[in-house]
Image: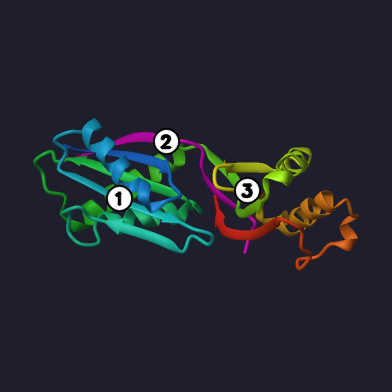
Amino acid sequence: MSATFQTIAGQTVCELKEKGSRFFGIAVPFSHEKELSEILTVLKDTYPKASHYCFAYRIGVDGTKFRVNDDGEPSGSAGRPILGAIDSAGLTNVLVVIVRYFGGTKLGIPGLIQAYKETGRLVLTQAEKVTKEFKIGLSMRFSYQRMGEIMGVLKELHIEIQRKDFNSDCHVVCSLPLKQHTELVTSIKAAILGWTADRVNESTEVADCSFELLDISF
């Protein structure tokens, strides 16, 4: 599995006109399915009275999660062509929504497939591409007595902290580059113990501190 993936830097919008119909393509960086409902709600407010809000997305470590939606267009005429545009661009963690205002002239299924495919291609061509690293979460729980010491180690090693909770106990979730996560966990343990890294391995325990690797994130 590659340690990096290509996606888009930010939201991009384009417009395509075809026989009176207007197609607005909106490409959005997208990494969690739970974001979909809110994005569609915003777009329906932005483009009111449109006849269709079709979309496709691909997300995940190997782009293995995807969904297509024709939103009332003939089956296979909208969502699949949009997904094809995403795949042709070699992207993941991307949502493309295409909003259609019907112009009064039916395009037929071949015409619809071409219009949705071309709008998807156009918006992704215009979008700025970025390469990002896959990351993996590291959950650490430790005693209050070790809080200052351990937080100092994380700061010294420039470890990115996603969230922290010092209420019931000390709990932090760190984000580590997938490619270097084993070495970084070793470095964290070694620094806390005051040992050299060659004395530490995956099974090395640290008193009053637990380590747990979480899911890959983006």
Residue identified by numbered label 1: 55
Name the one closer to the observer, 141 or 33. 141
Name the one closer to the observer, 60 or 54. 60
* Residue lying at 70% horizontally and 43% vertically, measured from the top left: 147
Circle 3: element type: strand
Pointers 1 and 2 in contact (CB under 8 A)?
Answer: no
Vertical order, 201 against 35 (above or below):
below
Main SS class of the magenta portion in the image: strand
Q: Which numbered circle lies on residue 11?
A: 2
Would you call the spot at circle 2 few (<14 residues within 10 Å), some (14-19), or many (20 or more)?
some
* Number of the front mark, 2 or 3: 3
Pointers 1 and 3 in contact (CB under 8 A)?
Answer: no
The question of residue 86 being in magenta is answered with no
Q: Earlier in the sequence, mark 1 or mark 3?
A: 1
Q: In the image, what residue type sits under mark 1?
A: Phe
* Residue lying at 29% horizontally and 46% vertically, measured from the top left: 37
Q: Where is residue 184 in the image (x, y as percent from the top left)?
A: 75, 53
Would you call the spot at circle 3 few (<14 residues within 10 Å), some (14-19), or many (20 or more)?
many
Vertical order, 53 against 80 (above or below):
above
Q: Which numbered circle lies on residue 189?
A: none
Q: In the image, what residue type sits under mark 3?
A: Ser
